[in-house]
Image: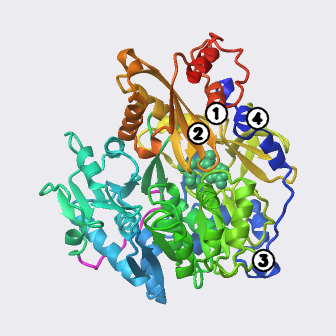
């Protein structure tokens, strides 16, 4: 690890003095007596879990899930870092999410309220959703998908996304969702890596009032021969014309719609793969994070119940994440349904057709638990508090945050404007809804650090406490625990049920990425600090991963995309701090030959990145420079470029091979 990627420099360059202020944050918001009295989890849970961690998780696994075959061994950690949780048990994820609730008399409870961006609505009870999933399971099986096969999913945020995931899980097929904002090229590389047999997609979706296509990207991805895909199932969502390949393409309505609604769920091994989800790392190639069934579902269900204080009989839960990200897997497709909750799914953007859309939805469906990202909160802050204040948000009981650090200012706004709204008439609740800031990752599968809303006195800006049964620490370069107040690397000391089981097809990379930095500890890639109360503060990534609007992007991946363009000789990408989106992508490029005089080069390169990776990865700013700052060993000093991108004086440049480079860059940017 080079000197410009240490936790300390990440901390200073991300937040600087602001961080020092954060660590002296002394506002505390204990739960109200009433909330605490009715909370599903009480304080004793921490001690119980600490006393015998495996026993605690075994109790959750049996209490929250129904097993086709009970397990006898809770954790096998004899071959680290390869864990087996509940290894000899068997269960079915879809049965747990659906059938058993119907068998238990909850068939008429609403599972999903769906609201499309244009305002169309659908409601699925647990009985209806079970039927749809059984049909989809039969349809996929009739297309030759068998247990262990991979299914690529490229869908918008519509009920069919959840139905597809659960249908795959039901038959033991492994889903691999690719976010709709990724390009055809990115989709193809993920299809190839997982060797997917089936693709489930839609003609398109709606974005800001207009139809937006999806199927053309699938067609483009499958144009070149040599892929493994036999069939493409297409949901008709926006009704736009699509190209069609007879024999390969099938409409959802013709395949799933025509399938039988009889399907028996069999038990799969607890360690049977449930899904692959690709995420960006420190190299150019995305990693297929592998999750398995029993442990993942246990921690998903437990955290969803504990952290959101879920009362499934009365709560209406809404997680705004897209199914293309891990939050949309764990906290939309799986946990809420496993827990028998009623949830809202919304297809569109928060500002369509007006900036009050989310709050209108909360009022309409009486949402009581809202789970969203800081970037969304900051966007709403920018639009103004008078917008949410017009709506009746009094149903809200718990507010969640995920994806990036939430700054205290946004935290306080969330509490005051959303959590304290007592009916849209300007009145405030005496006891605003508690805020739970949840830290976790694609790799951790489920929440790891978060307050418990009926127990913890919450603190603006801090994710605070490892959840019961989770052991995190902050260590220095040598892997030694650091004292409270000192920055370091966030690690996880003990295996946890929802932990990734590997990187698809690359055992070595799994070991190297997460388990080689420190002996016997999982290296998360985040900088962190404990404050004087022992609460955890997350300080941002210490590696080459950026966080833009809660979306994870790799600097190296975008650099690779840029240099794959013939006009680019070299590129360096940094994440620059941004008030709303957390970070934005800023690229520094050295051009080749005639491109130097091309006035459209910036647009060309932005579009090129859009094509290679997807619109979400397009650099906001591209700066053409004559040189890049490098160490004597040839490593680009991104820290210095970050100083430039964030408009700061350039820091210590003494290790540069050629220390006139920063001056050259400054001169060229002045032009
Ligand atoms: C990275 C993981 C967790 C689902 C969505 C993102 C950052 C996530 C927080 C938080 C500070 C956070 C970390 C982490 N992150 N939640 N509450 N406070 N940082 O999953 O795409 O795998 O990204 O997001 O840097 O490593 P992901």
Q: In this view, does 404 lie above or below 13?
A: below
Q: In the rendered image, is residue 88 in sight?
A: no
- Check if residue 263 falls in the magenta segment: yes
- Say which residue label 4 marks: 476
Q: Which tag, 2 or 3, sits closer to the chain's start?
A: 3
- Say which residue label 3 marks: 431
Q: Which mark is residue 517?
A: 1
- Measuring 76% from the left and 35% from the top, which residue is drawn there? 476
**Residue 202 sits in quarter:** bottom left
For the residues labelled 4 and 2, say whether their Cβ atoms are less than 8 Å apart. Answer: no
Q: Quadrant of the C terminus?
A: top right
For the residues labelled 2 and 1, say whether their Cβ atoms are less than 8 Å apart. Answer: yes
Task: Say whether residue 220 is left or right of residue 276.
Answer: left
- Check if residue 57 falls in the magenta segment: no
Q: What element carries label 1?
A: loop
- Measuring 39% from the left and 40% from the top, which residue is drawn there? 610
Task: Say whether residue 22 is left or right of residue 667.
Answer: right
């Amino acid at each position: 690890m080079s000197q410009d990627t240490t936790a300390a420099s990440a901390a200073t360059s991300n937040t600087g003095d602001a961080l020092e202020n954060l660590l002296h944050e002394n506002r505390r918001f204990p739960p109200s007596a009433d909330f605490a009295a009715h909370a599903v989890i009480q304080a004793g849970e921490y001690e119980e879990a600490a006393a015998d961690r495996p026993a605690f998780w075994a109790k959750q696994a049996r209490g929250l899930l129904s097993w086709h075959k009970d397990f006898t061994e809770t954790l096998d950690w004899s071959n680290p870092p390869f864990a087996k949780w509940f290894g000899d048990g068997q269960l079915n994820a879809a049965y747990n999410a659906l059938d058993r609730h119907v068998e238990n008399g909850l068939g008429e409870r609403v599972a999903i309220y769906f609201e499309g961006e244009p305002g169309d609505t659908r409601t699925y009870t647990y009985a209806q959703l079970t039927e749809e999933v059984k049909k989809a399971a039969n349809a996929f099986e009739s297309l030759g998908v068998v247990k262990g096969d991979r299914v690529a999913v490229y869908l918008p945020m519509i009920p069919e996304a959840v139905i597809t995931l659960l249908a795959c899980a039901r038959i033991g097929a492994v889903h691999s969702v690719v976010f709709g904002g990724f390009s055809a090229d990115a989709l193809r590389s993920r299809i190839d890596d997982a060797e997917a047999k089936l693709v489930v997609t839609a003609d398109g979706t709606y974005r800001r009032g207009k139809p937006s296509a999806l199927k053309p990207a699938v067609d483009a991805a499958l144009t070149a021969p040599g892929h493994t895909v036999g069939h493409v199932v297409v949901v008709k969502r926006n009704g736009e014309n699509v190209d069609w390949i007879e024999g390969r393409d099938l409409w959802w309505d013709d395949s799933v719609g025509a399938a039988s609604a009889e399907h028996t769920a069999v038990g799969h091994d607890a360690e049977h793969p449930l899904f692959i989800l690709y995420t960006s790392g420190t190299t150019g190639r995305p990693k297929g994070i592998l999750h398995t069934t029993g442990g993942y579902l246990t921690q998903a269900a437990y955290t969803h119940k504990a952290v959101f204080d879920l009362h499934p009989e009365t709560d209406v839960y809404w997680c705004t994440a897209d199914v293309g990200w891990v939050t949309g897997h764990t906290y939309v497709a799986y946990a809420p349904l496993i827990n028998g909750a009623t949830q809202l799914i919304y297809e569109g953007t928060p500002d369509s057709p007006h900036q009050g859309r989310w709050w209108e939805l909360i009022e309409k469906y009486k949402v009581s638990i809202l789970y969203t990202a800081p970037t969304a909160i900051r966007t709403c802050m920018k639009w103004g508090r008078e917008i949410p204040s017009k709506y009746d948000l009094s149903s809200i009981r718990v507010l969640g945050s995920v994806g990036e650090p939430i700054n205290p200012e946004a935290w306080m706004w969330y509490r005051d404007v959303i959590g304290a709204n007592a009916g849209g008439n300007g009145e405030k609740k005496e006891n605003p809804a508690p805020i739970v800031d949840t830290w976790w990752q694609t790799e951790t599968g489920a929440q790891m650090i978060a307050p418990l809303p009926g127990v913890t006195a919450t603190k603006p800006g801090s994710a605070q406490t490892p959840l019961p049964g989770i052991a995190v620490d902050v260590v220095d370069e040598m892997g030694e625990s650091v004292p409270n107040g000192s920055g370091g690397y966030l690690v996880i000391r003990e295996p946890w049920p929802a932990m990734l089981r590997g990187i698809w097809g690359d055992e070595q990379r799994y070991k190297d990425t997460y388990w080689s930095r420190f002996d016997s500890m999982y290296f998360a890639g985040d900088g962190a600090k404990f404050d004087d109360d022992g609460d955890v503060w997350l300080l941002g990534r210490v590696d080459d991963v950026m966080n833009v609007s809660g979306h994870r992007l790799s600097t190296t991946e975008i650099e690779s995309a840029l240099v794959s363009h013939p006009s680019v000789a070299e590129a360096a990408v940094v994440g620059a701090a941004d008030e709303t989106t957390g970070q934005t992508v800023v690229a520094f490029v050295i051009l080749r030959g005639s491109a130097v005089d091309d006035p459209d080069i910036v647009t060309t390169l932005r579009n090129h990145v859009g094509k290679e990776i997807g619109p979400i990865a397009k650099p906001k700013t591209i700066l053409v420079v004559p040189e890049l700052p490098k160490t004597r060993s040839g490593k680009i000093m991104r820290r210095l470029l970050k100083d430039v991108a964030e408009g700061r004086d350039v820091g210590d440049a003494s290790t540069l091979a050629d220390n006139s480079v920063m001056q050259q860059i400054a001169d060229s940017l002045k032009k």
